[in-house]
Amino acid sequence: MGRLRLGVLISGSGRTLRNFIELAAADRIPARVAVVISSSSRAGGLEFARRAGIPTQVIDYDATPPEQCDERIALVLRAADVDLVCMAGFLKLWRIPPDFAGRVMNIHPALLPAFGGLGFYGDRVHRAVLAAGGAESGCTVHFADNEYDHGPIILQRRVPVRPDDTPESLADRVFAQELLAYPEAIRLYAAGRLKIEGRAVAVLPSDK
């Protein structure tokens, strides 16, 4: 597929976006960020995009009916001619139009289907894992659909939960794996190696 044009959706700090920008600049992912869309004008990730010269758009779900926001997102992405949309800490539910089906990824800081869904984001996820006494956690990259943290799973990376973990220490360890997992999913997509089969994703063998 070659070098992908990414549309990145954010709501907050933009750490995942910054990782994409740095990896693209170093030619470590076959992609570049073509546009960044934020659900908040206060999102720190907007500054990362501006410093990198990437066009940005703020679409405020709190001030505009959700259906209009959904359509505006699609219009911006189409205008930027993106190949793949990456949700990177995007806290709103974007209802994905048919022409983007199978072209939207999300990353979640837990091993889905556990600890996912509406209200499970950020430290809330890690607190829930610790409260449940889980022995392990991790992150999940999946194709997004029109439900929170739903859709076919592409890959997961796991970390142990330690007896002395806090939500912050667990979050740090999980995020370190997110920095590896999301770029790997993008590479697989760019190579044409991901095939959605119902609720699962098959990783096809490399041609090499």
Image: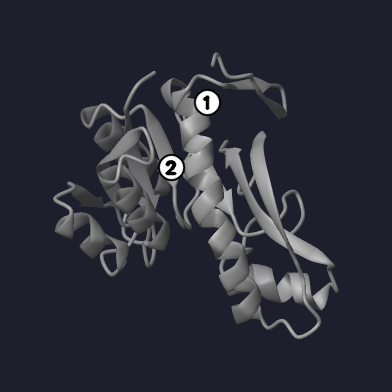
Residue name at image x 50 percent, y 55 percent: 179
In the displayed structure, would residue 116 be above or below residue 185?
A: below
In the displayed structure, would residue 63 be above or below residue 99?
A: below
Tag 2: amino acid: Cys
Q: Look at the image and tell me in which quarter the N terminus lies.
A: top left
Query: Which residue is labeled 1 in the image?
Result: 102
Q: Residue furthest front?
A: 208
Residue name at image x 47 percent, y 54 percent: 92
Tag 1: amino acid: Gly
Tell me where residue 41 appears, x and y as whole percent: 26, 64
Q: Residues within 10 Å of mark 1 (few under 14, many from 20)?
A: some
Q: Nearer the viewer, residue 153 or 76?
A: 153
User: Which quarter of the picture shows residue 117?
Assistant: bottom right
Which mark, residue 86? 2
Residue name at image x 42 percent, y 21 percent: 99
Q: Is residue 147 visible?
A: no
Cα gap from disc 1 to disc 2, whole angstroms? 11 Å
